Image: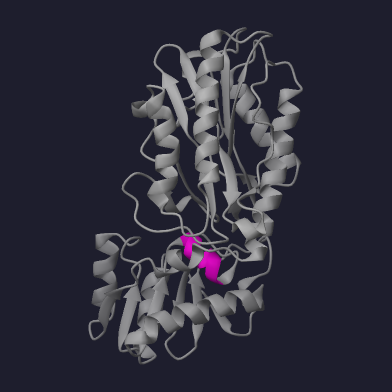
Amino acid sequence: MSEVHAGRRSRLRAHASSAGDVAAVVSRPSNVRYLVGPAPADAVLLVGHDGGDVLFGHWDPAEEPVGPRPHDEESLRVTPLDGDADPALAAVVAAAEGGARAVAVEEHHLTVARHRALTRAAPGAVFTDLDCAVERQRLVKDEDEIAALRVAAEITDRALGELLESILVGRTERHLALELERRLVDHGADGPAFPTSVATGSHSGLAGHRPTDRRVEEGDFLTVRLGARFRGYRCQIGRTFVIGTSPADWQIELYDVVFAAQRAAREALTPGAEYREVDRAAREVLSAAGHGRALGPVTGHGVGLEIGEDPRLSPAAMGRLGPCVPVTVEPGVHLPGRGGVRIDDTLVVRSPADGGPELLTITTKELLAL
């Protein structure tokens, strides 16, 4: 991976230096991880205009990093800091002392106060915005990244499958969520990709529901949303089930509508498709059934080192999908006071010649009665 990371930094250096001798200072943790591998949470990376890359941060000797250490790379120098020293400040000073004509920083990540401190530390330097250059580079995943996502999805499917084999009636949302997160770790995950959501009864179908002490009851819809984090990469799955042996007619009808919307969006995932076309495919199905306003602001989003990366699949989103871009497709409908349905999958965009979109989360989408 050291060669992969070095190649990523070289591409960023070429982007930053296209306007001359410009050094890049990367402070967003997920971007630092993408460029060097596991690093301290506060680490800041200097991608030098002259090829000298330095990682600044505070290392805890008691912590054992997962994966290759950044300092295993010959092309990357590591500078541990003491006390309360700001790694971004150290990076900017080093860039100025190294002769950089300008310093490109991640303005979308820095606070106003921190940005002011950086400009004071290097008064002779010109500051520019890196303008989400690393995020754009992260958009398309290489096969090693996709392989990590596959493993994360396999772990997630296993954890969910085991839960479905257990007795659910009488257990609380909170207890089930904790059990799912434990199972993720038991099967090899670094941890959950995001806070696990278990929603039952009138809570079901809510996108951002936080588990409560409500207990699972016969006849409930049960919505589960979870994902594993493996080597930093995160996936997402969402499924809805019925507790009991015979779903009510309204539950079957609602489930069928959401399933059709999800399928339409999945089928729209082709290289060259506009982001908003994918959203429209799901939204039109729900609108025709009278549930258009129930769909949230997005139908899906990118995944990788973060949940909620670019691209956003929304009505106003601009851009087109490329191959090897992993995204979620996650339409849902919630009926206040009754409950609802969510169906989430993680897929990788592939061309029709390569078999179409690659489904990573394979737990059945059949409406199961548990």
What residue is drawn where x is 60% and y is 64%?
Answer: 38
Q: Position of residue 154 (x, y in %)?
A: 72, 44
Q: Position of residue 216 (x, y in %)?
A: 60, 13
What residue is drawn where x is 71% and y is 51%?
Answer: 151
> What's the colour scheme?
one colour
Q: Along the horizontal axis of the image, is 77 left or right of 316? A: right
Point out the image quarter for the C terminus: top right
Q: Quadrant of residue 193?
A: top right
Looking at the image, residue 278 lies above or below residue 10: above
Looking at the image, residue 109 lies above or below residue 328: below
Magenta span: predominant SS is helix
What residue is drawn where x is 48% and y is 27%?
Answer: 210
Point out the image quarter for the N terminus: bottom right
Q: Along the horizontal axis of the image, is 81 left or right of 65? A: left
What residue is drawn where x is 38% and y is 58%?
Answer: 319
Q: Along the horizontal axis of the image, is 173 left or right of 18? A: right
Q: Is residue 32 magenta?
A: yes
Is residue 238 visible in this depiction of the protein?
yes
Q: Quadrant of residue 113?
A: bottom left
Is residue 63 visible in this depiction of the protein?
no
Q: Is residue 63 magenta?
A: no
Looking at the image, residue 108 lies above or below residue 299: below
Q: Position of residue 320 (x, y in %)?
A: 42, 58
Q: How many numbered callouts?
A: 0
Q: Nearer the viewer, residue 118 or 271?
A: 271
Residue range of the region highlighted in magenta in the rendering: 29-35
Q: Position of residue 303 (x, y in %)?
A: 53, 51
Q: Nearer the viewer, residue 81 or 244?
A: 244
